[in-house]
Image (cartoon, helix red, strand yellow):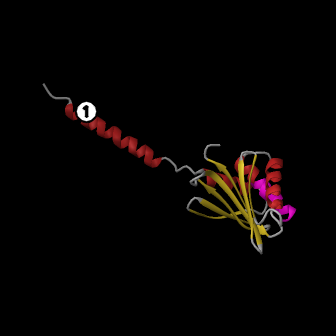
Amino acid sequence: MTSRRPFRRSALLAAALALSAAFAASPAHADRCDDSAKELANNIDKLKVNFKAGNFVYMTHPLARELSVGCKGDKYSIELYAKGARKPSPEFISLVGAMAAIVFTITKDDSTTGASRCLKRMGLLRGDKVVMRYRRLSLECTRTKTEAAISITRGKDE
């Protein structure tokens, strides 16, 4: 009588090789940052994706000095950052609102309202840094002598 043991080993080895080949041949999946950046570039005119560094995707637009989308920080699941002139124009606020609507999947009216409230609150009475919440989003607006910036995040638990 012959032993079946060698047959089991070879079948197990063949199955393991087939399984590892299947995982090695599967395409890599893009993360949420890449998907958000591509969707932003497709839906907003003149917006271009520059490069990805770490968890951030950097973009350019004529109305903004700096734009980025970040993923998976310590306290947030996704972040949108925009920097423009010290006194933001209505076009810049509209751009930030449109980007936030796409990234956070909320209506454009709500995201534009939140961005304009945050950017317009900076001034003599409230100072150069404003932190607020609007529609489950955390907004932080800061300004220096030459530029203003807005950072919109959504927490990990939301």
- As drawn, which residue projects farthest toward the right? 90
Q: Residue at x 32, y 39 (%)?
A: 14
First to last magenta residue range: 88-99
Q: Position of residue 98 (x, y in %)?
A: 79, 54
Looking at the figure, which quarter contains the C terminus?
top right
Q: Is residue 14 visible?
A: yes
Task: Name the secondary structure under disc 1.
Answer: helix
- Choose top left, top right, bottom left or bottom right for residue 94: bottom right
The amino acid at mark 1 is Arg
Q: Residue furthest left?
A: 1
Locate residue 6, reporting x and y percent.
20, 35
Front residue of 134/52: it is 134
Q: Please identify the quadrant where the N terminus is shown.
A: top left
- The residue beneath circle 1 is 8
Please indicate whether residue 138 sits to the left or right of residue 9 in the image. Answer: right
Count of numbered badges drawn on the protein: 1
Above or below, comparing residue 3 to residue 29 in the picture: above
Is residue 25 covered in magenta? Answer: no
> Can the viewer see residue 61 in this picture?
no
Tell me: 22 left or right of 37: left
Splitting the image into 4 quarters, where does residue 42 fall?
A: bottom right
Magenta stretch: dominant SS? helix
Whole-percent x, y for residue 50 in the image: 66, 66
Q: Is residue 98 magenta?
A: yes
Name the residue rendered at 75%, 45% in the picture: 135
In the displayed orientation, state which residue is furthest to the top.
Answer: 1
